[in-house]
Image: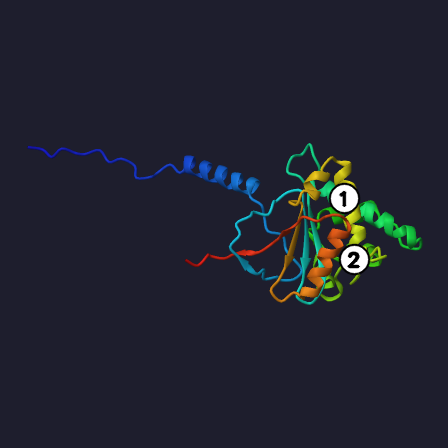
Amino acid sequence: MGKVKIKKSSTVIDMTAMSDVTVLLLTFFMLTSTFLQKEPVQVITPPATSELKVPDEKLVQVLIAPDGKVYMNLTGAKDSTQLSTETFRTEVLQEAYGEYTKTHPGAPKLTVRQAKEFSKIGTFGVKMKDIASWLNLSLEKRDEFLKEKGGIPIAMTVEGTNNEFQIWLQAIKSVMQSHGLGKDLIGGQGVAVKAGQDSPYSLVQVVMDNLQQERLNKFVLMTSLKVEEE
């Protein structure tokens, strides 16, 4: 009796459908993920058991470095019909620098290109007189400048002063109020203070005093989550 020949089938698996799904998933995660922005200094926040989430939009973050320097980061609204991040940063820069030039008429004017560069920057912190030249630097040189010569000038006392930190705060309030977002800022969820375990407490107190001077009495202190002991 003759042997029955079994027809051999192809062992090749069509991966086209799986490749399409992989690309779609990758695109989805890229569009919906929030990337961590690079900070000029590493700050190790103190542990806490609070699970209060810091908002990821319409936020003003104040970073207090261990060496006593103060930086800021501005994030706009996710809704494109409101205040976008790039528009937020651009308008705050124009408002703050315009206020600075009132008492420093010899300061160089900012160009459209410099304003556009600032709108793309996450954490910033330089003296007003250095902003124009700082924005002309390459990305690598900007980071080096922030680490070596950075820091927003802030007065150790708020009485009778209008330091540059307050100028930025006033500009932020003005821009957010002009876009109808003043409640988000003043309501307590619009400002986050990030200080490390080694950050000088005296400077943290000064930052809080300056916030209160601008009637920003409610703000969030950023901490790392600590497991509560039983």
- Residue in the picture at 79% in, 53% down: 166
Between residue 109 and residue 223, name the one nearer to us.
Answer: 223
Q: Which residue is mark 2?
A: 134
Could you say where residue 223 lies in the image, as x and y percent from the top left? 57, 56
- Residue in the picture at 79% in, 61% down: 157
Could you say where residue 59 lies in the image, as x and y percent from the top left? 67, 46
* SS for callout 1: helix
The amino acid type of the residue labelled 2 equals: Trp
Q: Is residue 17 left or right of residue 200?
A: left
* SS for callout 2: helix
Q: Quadrant of the C terminus?
A: bottom left
- Residue in the picture at 42% in, 34% down: 17
- Residue in the picture at 86% in, 52% down: 100
Which of the 4 image quarters holds residue 6? top left
Could you say where residue 83 lies in the image, as x and y percent from the top left? 71, 37
Q: Is residue 19 above or below residue 223?
A: above
Q: Is residue 80 above or below residue 43?
A: above
| Viewer-side label of 2, 1 | 1
Q: Which residue is mark 1?
A: 173
Residue most extreme to the left: 1
Alpha carbon of mark 2 to alpha carbon of mark 1: how far? 24 Å
Instruction: Answer yes or no: is residue 115 visible.
Output: no
Which of the 4 image quarters holds residue 178? top right
Between residue 124 and residue 20, name the one nearer to us.
Answer: 124
Q: Quadrant of the N terminus?
A: top left
Instruction: Answer yes or no: is residue 116 visible.
Output: yes
